[in-house]
Image: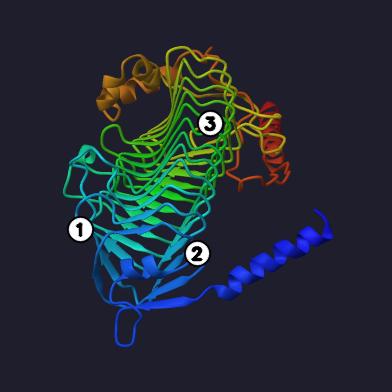
Amino acid sequence: MTRIASALAVFALWSVTADARSWTVGGAGADFPFIAPAIAAASAGDTIEVRGGVYREDLVIDKRLAVVGLNRPTLIGTGIGTVVTIVAPQSELSGFAIEGSGTGQTNGMDAGVQIASNGNRIVDNVFRRVFYGIVIVDARRNEIADNEIHGLRELPFGQRGDGIYLYRAPENFVARNRISGERDAIYFQYAPRGRAVDNVARDSRYALHDMFSDDTVIARNEFSDSVVGANIMNSRRIKLERNLIGRNRGVPGIGLTLKDCDESIVRGNTIAGNGRGLLVDGSSRNQFVDNRFDANDTAATIFSSAEENAFSGNQFTANSSDVVLSGRDAGTRWSIGGRGNFWSRYRGFDFDGDGIGDTPHPLVGAFERIEGNNPATRMFLLSPAAAGLELAARLSAPSTSDALDSRPLTRAASPGAVPARTHLPALLLLLVVASMIAGADRCLR
């Protein structure tokens, strides 16, 4: 770009900014009593400030505007269709309480806000009694942040909408929202390269749903108290890091599902208190690193269709079952670079003190083998028969299964920490042996 062209571009931007003005809505001395007339009168680049109060109208933002609520005004729709539709790019809607959308009776995606343009910001709003919260269709690079969305809890899941729904919408940013009572709290569908960061999603069917959305980043969220915490399907190269996925129970009651997902990384998550912590089906070449699986009924369920996945540095503690294999083990690796996983059930020793067990850890117990082929037997997990079966297996010959962690960690170190090297166990063993030899020598005398 030449200097003259650059100067003209800067001058044009300055001219637009200089001409922009602010309008006020509601209260004494305001420019307009309602919001829609202010939108009609405003020019692109203007700001509309809406004072506290109740406004009963549906809005269409068809030019680049910032519509800002002061003191949380309540915007109630007509109950037919969507309350706020944004068709102009680079607009902002913030500071409102929004309610009163349609409820999908015409099979439409009636919503609090529906976006059909790029580069908009929907921030710091509260959504109540809306079918969908926020819908983005065929649009990219929008920011959806710091909103609170409450679904229609009184309806069955199948009759509710989604909290934040992104359809054919790449590269959108969803951050710090608090969502509950939805069908799917956050749903990426054909929405690649999206980011979901620092959200709290609870009390929904799926707290997070991702389908046909490659390269999604899902980080530092809480997905809890739902039927499924995070359900990721038909996607590749997902990064799921440092999330809390907990207390997802009922039917099917799963913390994290990977279905037909490949080449993804699941790192540093806490998966705790779920019916099943992790379910992997039809998914290949994924890595599960430095996650904590705690107090789940089953920590990890892996189907034979899941091939060449790898686990390293994970902590398996206080689960009723650590691993259930449904069908044959399709090449799952239980260590990466010589680093296995920590198992609270491990009964081996670490004589050289390097933090790695000296004997392999068999992952699947006698009962879990039966359960892998017949899930209905799960109801007998805590029965005396199951305990007797496990005891008999321990007293019999060592397991020849290939489902082994050959490099089990003997300390539940912090993720990424290098265990301190100590020879104390070996020294203790030497002292015991020396004592036995001395005692035997005294007896011989």
Whether residue 399 sits left or right of residue 431 in the image: it is left
Task: Answer with mark 3 or mark 2, whichever residue precedes in sequence.
Answer: 2
Q: Nearer the viewer, residue 277 or 322?
A: 277
Residue 37's x, y, as percent?
32, 69
Circle 3 Cα neighbour tier, 10 Å, few/some/many (<14 / 14–19 / ≥20):
few
Whether residue 414 sits left or right of residue 374 in the image: it is right
Closer to the observer: label 2 or label 1?
2
Towards the viewer: 362 or 112: 112
Residue displayed at 58% across by 19% down = 308
Q: Amino acid at mark 2?
A: Ala
> Which residue is at a point 22% across and 43% down the rendered structure image?
104
The three-letter code of the residue at mark 3 reads: Arg
* Horizontal relation, residue 94 to residue 180: left or right: right
Image quadrant occupied by the C terminus: top right
Q: Quadrant of residue 384?
A: top left
User: What amino acid does circle 1 point to?
Assistant: Thr
Instruction: Give SS at disc 3.
Output: loop
**Residue 119 higher or lower than 293, as above or below:** below
Residue 197 position within the rendered picture, expressed as x and y whole percent measured from the top left: 51, 51
Residue 148 lies in what quarter of the image?
A: bottom left
Q: Which residue is mark 3?
A: 347
Frontmost residue, 254 versus 21? 21
Cα separation, mark 2 vs mark 1, equals 26 Å
Q: Residue furthest right?
A: 3
Q: Which residue is mark 2?
A: 44
Which one is earlier in the sequence, the residue at label 2 or at label 1? 2
Q: Are circles 3 and 1 on residues that touch, CB within 8 Å?
A: no
Asked whether the beta carbons under mark 2 and mark 1 sit within 8 Å of each other, the answer is: no
